[in-house]
Every structure is written in C-alpha cells, then in structure tokens.
Amino acid sequence: MRNTKPLGLAAMAAAAALTLTACGGGGDEQAGGGETGGSGESVRIGIKYDQPGLGFRDGDQYTGFDVDVATYVANELGYSADQIEWVESPSANRENMLANDQVDMIFATYSITEERDQTVDFAGPYFVAGQDLLVRAEDDSIQGPADLEGKNLCSVTGSTSAQRVKDDQPGANLVEQPGYADCLTALESGQVDAVTTDDIILAGLASTEANQGKFKVVGNTFSEERYGVGLPQGSDQCEAVNEAITKMIDEGAWEEAVTANTEGADYSYNAELNPPEPEPCGE
C-alpha cells in the first residue's frame, strides 16, 4: 500500500527539485564548484538531461526520480536546493567526470558493476531496474521476451539492451534507432511492436504528457540493474549517502517519488527487488 501520510522534509526535498534554478544551480554551471549557497558551499550532482521521469532538463527546470533522490540525499548531507549545481552526465563520460573532479556525485541510471567499481565508488543502490518491454496500451500479445519471435523490436543503437536482444532473442527483428523518442514514435505508428530498455526508463518515457495512456510496460523484467550513486574513488560520503537513501525509503518519500515520476505509464516496479537495501560501503 502506498504511503499517504504527510512527508514533511521528504516532501519538501522532492518539491524543491521543481524550483531549483529559481535559487541558482543552473545547467550552465558545469564543473566550477561555484559558490551558490548561503554558506558559500555547493555540491555538484551529475544527472541525465534527456531521460523523462528520471533526469530531465526543460529550460531551467530539472525533474525526475533521479533528481528527487539526489535532492533528498543532498538535503540530508546539509545542502539546500540552492546549493545544488546540476551537471549533465552522459553515460560514456561518468567515470571520467568523477575521476577529474567535475562532479561530487552522480545519480544517472548508473548501474553498479564490477568493472566500474574498479575506478569509482558506489553508494546505494537506490533502485533496482530490469530490462523490460514497452508495448501499445491495447496490445496483450506480448507478455515477455518469449513472445518476440517474428516481432519488430526497437532499441537504441549500441545499447546493452539491443545487444542482449541480439544474443538472447534472435527470432526478434531488431530495429535500432538513435534515441528512445524515435522508438516510441515507431511504436505508436505500428512500425514496431515493442521497445526495450530498463523498465523505469520505459515508464518515464510513457509517463510524459504526450504519451500518457498510449503505452504500457509489460512488467516481465529479464535483467537486473542496480542503480547506484557514483562517487569519486576514496570518497568519505558513502555511509552518509546510504543513510539518506534508507531514510528516504523509511519515510515513504522514495515510494512517492517513484509514483509521481511514472504516473500514467501503467507501471509497477519489481517489488521483490524494490525498495532496495543499500549495500555496505567498501564491498
């Protein structure tokens, strides 16, 4: 059952994500570490700018589940909304940005892997996603990967999602597009039968105002992606970040953030894996 109690600080932290740049923290402030807060200190947080429902920039507004979690964690670490500098952190640049002191932490659908763990530290996870399928709202013919035989399936060129389909579902006709927005256009028009990537990314895409009610997430995940908070190697913030994530979950703010950012997508997260328990630091 969803938590419906007033969330106090948690609700204020989530709401602050919608008004961040009214207080500073604009997207053009990249790696300068400028003094944006009243105390003369700021925190530079890397997010995606192009993932609706997770990390999305629209003018001077920053929204999404990653943004809400990052804002809550920053608040618990002692940073107010006007002390956050949002920094665009594309997938290919995340390790370098942490190593080169361009950001202090990253919340950007950043899966914890053994390979990445060699060069950066991770707190969390704060969400466990899984590769899933997005189909048209009225289509009940696709319930999972086994139903993709002979179907047209869209994913983004070069993505791990596309490669997994090539390896595991050779009977599917893989249609690769430069971005997921292109995949949704093809899905709506009937050119493809499904779109695949992480379930919460699909939910975020389907929850946008233009897409609400048109699509549904199948809800049969076939991978496990632990979204962690990327930290510079040797950071002393891991324990504090984990405590903040745990508090956000316990207070109900985590649940509320997931719900708010996937509304209209006909989506339910994997309740066997979520909400996750952050892993011990240094392991």
Image (cartoon, rainbow, N blue to C red):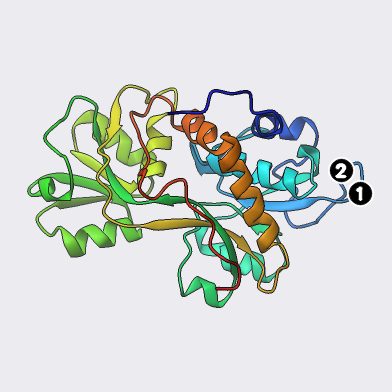
- Observer-nearest residue: 182 or 127? 127
Q: Position of residue 163 (x, y in %)?
A: 27, 62
Q: Position of residue 190 (x, y in %)?
A: 18, 32
User: Label 2 neighbourhood size at 10 Å, few (<14), some (14-19), many (20+)?
Assistant: some
x 80%, y 44%: residue = 83
171 to the left or right of 241: left
Pick the quarter of the image with the C terminus: bottom right
The residue beneath circle 2 is 37
x 9%, y 55%: residue = 171
> Relative to residue 53, is residue 174 depicted above or below?
below
In terms of secondary structure, where does tag 2 sit?
loop
x 51%, y 43%: residue = 50
The residue beneath circle 1 is 40
Identified by mark 2, the residue type is: Gly
Pick the quarter of the image with the N terminus: top left
Q: Quadrant of residue 36?
A: top right
